[in-house]
Image (cartoon, rainbow, N blue to C red):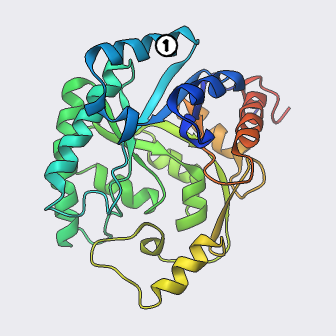
Amino acid sequence: MALSLTNKIGVIIDCFGAGVREGLNKAQETGAEGVQIWAVSGEMDPGNLSFNSRKELKGTIAGMGLEVSALCGDLGGHGFQDHVENPSKIEKSKRILDLAMDLGCNVVTTHIGIVPEDPTDPVYRIMQEACAELCEYASKVKGYFAVETGPETAAQLKTFLDTLGGKGVAVNFDPANMVMVTGDDPVKGVHLLKDYIVHTHVKDGIRLQSVDPRVIYGAIGYKPLDHQNIAKLVSTGELFRELPLGEGEVDFDAYFAALQDIGYGGYLTVEREVGDDPERDILRAVSFIRKYRKGAANQ
């Protein structure tokens, strides 16, 4: 099947390692149409942006010919696995979604923590209650909290999302995370999660060793006996490695075809968290995706 994607291309401006304004400039220079911005602390913390500041920022972004594809609202830790921390995390997440809406965007991407395989696990219920509240709030304001794929298989994530009673908690599909951590098939994952996908990352990588996802993402109450050695393996890239687009194990012909097949019309947002020259890699990634938008692939 010849591909001719119509999706807009976004970039995560924090990957440039500059402030928001400079990141916007660099994003514009790549020719991207949208930007994703980290909005947890610092200048983009919702508590630091007044109504007028939000209005001014929205105008600046629009004046540059850009849109906000999503805000990143990942609060770290173990996501929503800790019932003690959850009330404050839920409240902060809601404020980040409010900010997104003020900026003309309705998607906040996040990590919720690894969903336990066993639904009778007490942590499963804790996460379920937190995400149900987020789901209700997002649905009310016509927005989405988009869970990034990777910590668990697509099937495991879908089973969990199906219990929440709505689509307010949705999916930010990252094919590289699946390849690098769980070894899951992104193409099958797209079809499984098709009713939930509202945003995507375009990233590549390779899996070098099979590993328990809890080693990578952490989990409440989990600490491997050889955690120091494992931390070293993660930091030195001996378990998996993020790579520039086209150099890893993500089959982009098949991945983009799957997105086209399910009718996904949202952003394809470039993420490049490592490397000697992320700016160069992001520019190349935008060009890489454009080949598919022009229908050049598979012809």
Would residue 139 be found to the left or right of residue 213 on screen? Answer: left
Indicate the amino acid at tag 1.
Thr
Q: Quadrant of the N terminus?
A: top right
- How far from the left and from the top, in percent, is residue 101? 32, 22
Q: Residue furthest right?
A: 299
Residue 277 position, x and y percent, is: 74, 47
Number of numbered tags placed on the structure image: 1
Camera sees residue 39: no
Counting from the top left corner in percent of width and height, residue 258 is at: 60, 40
Q: Residue 85's image quarter?
A: bottom left
- Is residue 212 in sight in this rendering? yes
Q: Position of residue 36 (x, y in %)?
A: 50, 33
**Relative height, residue 56 to residue 225 (above, below):** above
Q: Residue at x 35, y 27 (%)?
A: 100
Q: Nearer the viewer, residue 228 or 188?
A: 228
The residue positioned 39% from the left and 33% from the top of the image is 43
Residue highlighted by disc 1: 60
Q: Nearer the viewer, residue 260 or 44?
A: 44
Q: Quadrant of residue 98?
A: top left
Q: Residues within 10 Å of mark 1 (few under 14, many from 20)?
A: some
Image quarter hosting the C terminus: top right
The foreground one among 62 and 247 is: 62
Does dot 1 land on a helix, a strand or a loop?
A: helix
- The answer to which image quadrant residue 255 occupies is top right
Identified at 53% across, 81% down, the residue is 230
Q: Is residue 53 left or right of residue 26?
A: left
Q: Is residue 184 above or below residue 61?
A: below
